[in-house]
Image: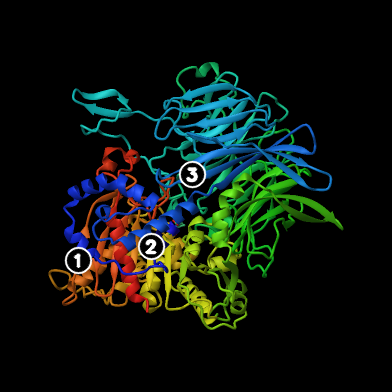
């Protein structure tokens, strides 16, 4: 997203202004259909042109001159250079007979820009440790692509591999069991058994039992056939057929878990009996529970009885317990609990008929294990089976914020293996309220290794946000002692990939250092563990040579920004400095800058603002930011108070103060770098999506003179519009009113709340006054004013976004249009064209204001794999959605988009002194 937005912001190397303006080009453009046709035809030529750098006047799209095209072309090449570098996504370690040897399997990903998809491949390596602590990695000569593979999961002994194969948008799914040299078993699973497996990292759970005879997993419950009316009346059996030609009743409305999960059926548990090849539905889970994150419980005294432990989310999680599913993505505040349920190991004789996940006659009911805790997830059993360890987002559930500091808990698992609702639960790592600088700031985990244990059986290793970095920590689950395992006091971010006995395979990076595989081992000095880290040479390193050389002159630091005028009454954690990550384009005087001694630096800066608002910008390498940095921009990522990783007090200070405290913090960070001469304050761009877009639009309205360019993806511009249309209405109350707002959450907000939401929103800055004269027949709205907004801003709006629906951003642009129409003598030029971007509707809207150019492009959001291509925008047929979702092929480059960008750039250039 970031590269998409920011690469169009301002190009320092821009030579001359394009000769034709956007307005000229739109005049020349034929109506939408012809327009599409022309572009479709030109695609191959232009693509070749982009890739080869060859341009001819004949082939040039209307409105672009050769120099502009050369610019796009060279940046397209550079973007390719950054995008094609692989990412290190996952790793597994396999023990060998020798203590000093093991094998590793790495899953890498590589973005294919033109296909708009991520390709996945596996590369293996032998690891040999010698006594002098040196490590040798012997890599296989070539990677193997994992085509159509959605997951791979090795068995506990490492002798078998589960491969889940799923061709996009096709059923059935296939489960394969591989031995070391051959395919042992393969089954296809029809939709009547279950739908797609959940591999989303949240509901997801795929767990082998210790005997390696069964695999438990989470998948969409089977398709329930719906009653159908056809030409001959009511069809009793119903049908799953798709018939677009006629109207049919579609049965009851089914709720889903909002953004990312729209149209996904309820997650339910299934077991694959490897010997018989049967799929068994796990029974006893009430329909109001969505089940996920399943693991096998240790075998108890009754060998024939096996239990599964899973997380259950009740559909009754809405405001004031109204039965409504609220959005789950990024929302850790949804109550959830651990449950245990009997695992069916083979088909019972009474259950020989078609499988049905909802067989109510089954006697084995799920047992709630954590009823006293409002949230429990990521369950992991200790290797000796004595403890069940899990995370809790209790602080989020209780306060209502969508993400807060986690706590870690330990349940004593009954010795006879029978799950008990009254088992003792202890808190291992509590919520940290106000951490001192450089001290452990609390847990902020969005993932957990399947097997996180060191050999002492009571220490787990995990990765967590730690202020502006990511860090690896070890936690003793008996003593609660937390140690930072990755090096501290640097700008690097670390993530654990896998454990090799007591050694750790990890990846480390920074905004200017591409990912590097690391191998860590522990030495003890005076009983204090200390970790040493070795660089692992990897064939991948070569892929980064060009990128590394482009980034070699950049510098990165984490700045501590003092809070502006903190009130004495504020809690300590809210008064402490917050942080910003600063990536400086080459500047030999950087050290002097840091020491406050420099007064000028010329390169422009891009402010990058994360969303949430309870999320964090970390120093983990980002291809898009590195690309921007290589173009010559300084980058500032502000972790305003409310971000994750800085303790609970600072986090909880933001709800109720959005639009002011966060905006002030961003401006303080900007003042900080401008005041120290680290950047040129007259060349500042700002970008962010969602809540980051809320900040972006607030900033250009509240501080219009400070930004020469802005770009936003799915911005939240009007909370009073959001509340009635989003999948997370509760968010509006909590963030606008503070956690007190929890008491007032309602599906039918009062006018007082709607007014409050409006006044907290960026859109309120577009309006001069909103007094409605009720005595008049037609309500009259005083003319809004957009005079305040001067910054050219690019809107990228996801047509299918359930979180911040598209109209939130569109309204901002439309409001501006309305305002202009009513402003005397103002000139309005508007082009509304229907395009598609990767098969979804794209509607660029251009508004020419005297000082402001607003553009909107409707693009998909969160539809994986999501890569917006700033240099290779595409169109397909505008009807693509109706014609069948995502399978519309890329047909053309959208020249007009380039033209829009050119205009946008020109608008920006006008603002740069
Ligand atoms: C909880 C949540 O989704 N909040 C949105 C307002 C938001 O800012 N989302 C961010 C994380 C995004 O990038 O979508």
Q: Is residue 712 left or right of residue 536?
A: left
Nearer the observer, 332 or 492: 492
Q: Residue 56, percent across and down?
A: 29, 54
Residue with the mark numbered 2:
8
Characterize the local packing of mark 1: few (<14), some (14-19) or many (20 or more) Cα atoms within 10 angstroms.
some
Residue 468 or residue 297, whichever sits in front: 468
Q: Nearer the viewer, mark 3 or mark 2?
A: 2
Whether residue 456 is situated above or below residue 806 in the rendered picture = above
Do the residues under discs 1 and 3 have CB atoms within 8 angstroms?
no
Question: In this view, which residue lies farthest toward the right?
Answer: 526
Residue 372 seen by the camera = no
Do the residues bearing badges 2 and 1 touch, measured as CB atoms within 8 Å? no
Look at discs 2 and 1 and give the one toward the viewer: 2
Disc 1 marks which residue? Answer: 829
In this figure, which residue is indicated by the disc labeled 3?
314
Q: Is residue 112 above or below residue 908?
A: above
Q: What SS does tag 1 mark? A: loop
Q: Which mark is residue 166?
A: none
Image coordinates of residue 143 in percent, x first then y, are: 57, 37
């Amino acid at each position: 997203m970031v590269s998409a937005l920011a690469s169009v912001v301002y190009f320092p190397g821009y030579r001359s202004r394009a000769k034709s303006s956007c307005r000229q080009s739109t005049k020349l453009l034929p109506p939408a259909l012809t327009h599409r046709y022309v572009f479709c035809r030109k695609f191959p030529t232009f693509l070749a042109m982009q890739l080869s750098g060859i341009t001819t006047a004949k082939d040039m799209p209307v409105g672009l001159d050769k120099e502009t095209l050369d610019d796009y072309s060279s940046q397209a090449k550079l973007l390719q250079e950054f995008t094609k570098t692989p990412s290190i996504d996952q790793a597994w370690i396999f023990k060998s007979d020798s203590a000093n040897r093991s094998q590793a399997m790495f899953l890498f990903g590589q973005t294919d820009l033109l296909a708009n998809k991520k390709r996945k491949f596996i590369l293996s390596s032998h690891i040999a440790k010698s006594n002098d602590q040196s490590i040798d990695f012997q890599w296989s000569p070539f990677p193997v692509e994992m085509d159509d593979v959605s997951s791979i999961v090795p068995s506990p002994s490492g002798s078998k591999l589960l491969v889940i194969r799923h061709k996009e948008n096709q059923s059935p799914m296939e489960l394969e069991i591989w031995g070391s040299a051959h395919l042992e078993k393969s089954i296809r699973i029809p939709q009547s058994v279950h739908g797609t497996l959940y591999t989303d990292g949240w509901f997801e759970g795929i767990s082998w039992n210790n005997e390696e005879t069964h695999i438990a997993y989470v998948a969409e419950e089977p398709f329930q056939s719906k009653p159908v009316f056809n030409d001959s009346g009511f069809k009793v059996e119903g049908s799953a057929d798709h018939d677009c030609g006629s109207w049919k009743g579609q049965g009851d409305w089914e709720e889903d878990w909002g953004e990312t999960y729209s149209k996904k059926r309820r997650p339910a548990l299934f077991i694959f009996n490897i010997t018989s090849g049967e799929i068994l539905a796990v029974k006893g889970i009430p329909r109001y529970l969505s089940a996920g994150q399943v693991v096998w419980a240790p075998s108890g005294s009754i060998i024939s009885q096996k239990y599964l432990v899973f997380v259950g989310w009740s559909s009754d999680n809405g405001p004031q317990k109204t039965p409504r599913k609220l959005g789950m993505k990024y929302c850790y505040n949804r109550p959830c609990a651990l449950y245990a349920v009997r695992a069916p190991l083979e088909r019972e004789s009474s259950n020989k008929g078609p499988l049905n996940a909802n067989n109510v006659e089954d006697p084995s009911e799920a047992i709630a294990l954590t009823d006293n805790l409002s949230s429990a997830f990521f369950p992991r059993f200790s290797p000796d089976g004595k403890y069940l360890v899990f995370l809790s987002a209790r602080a989020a559930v209780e306060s209502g914020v969508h993400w807060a500091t986690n706590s870690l808990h330990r349940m004593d698992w009954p010795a006879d293996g029978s799950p008990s609702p009254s088992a003792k639960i202890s808190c291992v790592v509590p919520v940290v309220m106000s951490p001192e600088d450089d001290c452990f700031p609390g847990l902020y985990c969005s993932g957990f290794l399947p097997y996180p244990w060191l050999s002492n059986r009571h220490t787990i290793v995990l990765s967590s946000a730690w202020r502006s970095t990511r860090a690896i920590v070890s936690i003793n689950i008996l003593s609660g002692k937390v140690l930072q395992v990755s090096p501290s006091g640097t700008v690097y971010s670390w993530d654990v990939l896998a454990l090799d006995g007591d050694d750790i395979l990890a990846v480390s990076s920074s905004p200017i250092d591409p990912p590097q595989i690391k191998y860590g081992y522990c030495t003890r000095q005076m009983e204090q563990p200390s970790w040493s880290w070795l660089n692992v040479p990897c064939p991948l390193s070569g892929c980064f040579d060009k990128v590394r050389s482009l980034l070699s002159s950049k510098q990165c630091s984490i700045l501590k920004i003092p809070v502006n005028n903190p009130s004495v009454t504020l809690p300590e954690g809210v008064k402490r400095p917050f942080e910003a990550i600063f990536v400086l384009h080459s500047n030999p005087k950087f050290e002097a800058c840091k020491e406050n001694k420099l007064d000028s630096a010329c390169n422009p800066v891009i402010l990058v603002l994360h969303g949430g608002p309870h999320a964090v910008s970390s120093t983990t390498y980002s291809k898009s930011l590195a690309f921007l940095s290589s173009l010559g921009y300084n980058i500032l990522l502000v972790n305003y108070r409310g971000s994750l990783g800085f303790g609970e007090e600072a986090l909880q200070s933001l709800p109720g103060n959005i639009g002011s405290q966060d905006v002030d913090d961003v401006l303080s960070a900007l003042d900080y770098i401008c005041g120290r001469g680290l950047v040129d304050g007259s060349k500042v761009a700002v970008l962010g999506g969602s809540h980051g877009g809320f900040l972006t639009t607030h900033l250009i309205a509240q501080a219009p003179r400070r930004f020469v360019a802005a770009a936003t993806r799915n911005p939240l511009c009007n909370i009073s519009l959001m509340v009635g249309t989003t999948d997370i209405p509760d968010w509006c109350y909590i963030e606008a009113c503070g956690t007190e707002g929890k008491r007032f959450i309602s599906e039918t907000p009062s006018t007082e709340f709607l007014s409050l939401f409006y006044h907290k929103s960026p859109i309120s800055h577009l309006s001069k006054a909103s007094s409605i004269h009720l005595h008049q027949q037609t309500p009259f709205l005083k003319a809004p004013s957009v005079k305040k907004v001067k910054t050219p801003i690019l809107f990228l709006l996801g047509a299918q976004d359930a979180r911040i629906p598209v109209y939130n951003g569109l309204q901002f642009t439309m409001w501006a249009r309305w305002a202009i129409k009513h402003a005397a003598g103002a000139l309005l030029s508007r082009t509304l064209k229907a395009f598609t971007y990767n098969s979804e509707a794209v509607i660029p809207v251009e508004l020419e204001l005297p000082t402001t150019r607003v553009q909107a492009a409707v693009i998909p959001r969160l539809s994986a794999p999501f890569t917006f291509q700033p240099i290779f925008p595409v169109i397909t047929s505008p009807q693509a959605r109706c014609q069948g979702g995502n399978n519309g092929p890329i047909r053309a480059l959208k020249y007009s988009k380039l033209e829009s960008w050119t205009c946008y750039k020109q608008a920006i250039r006008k603002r740069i002194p």
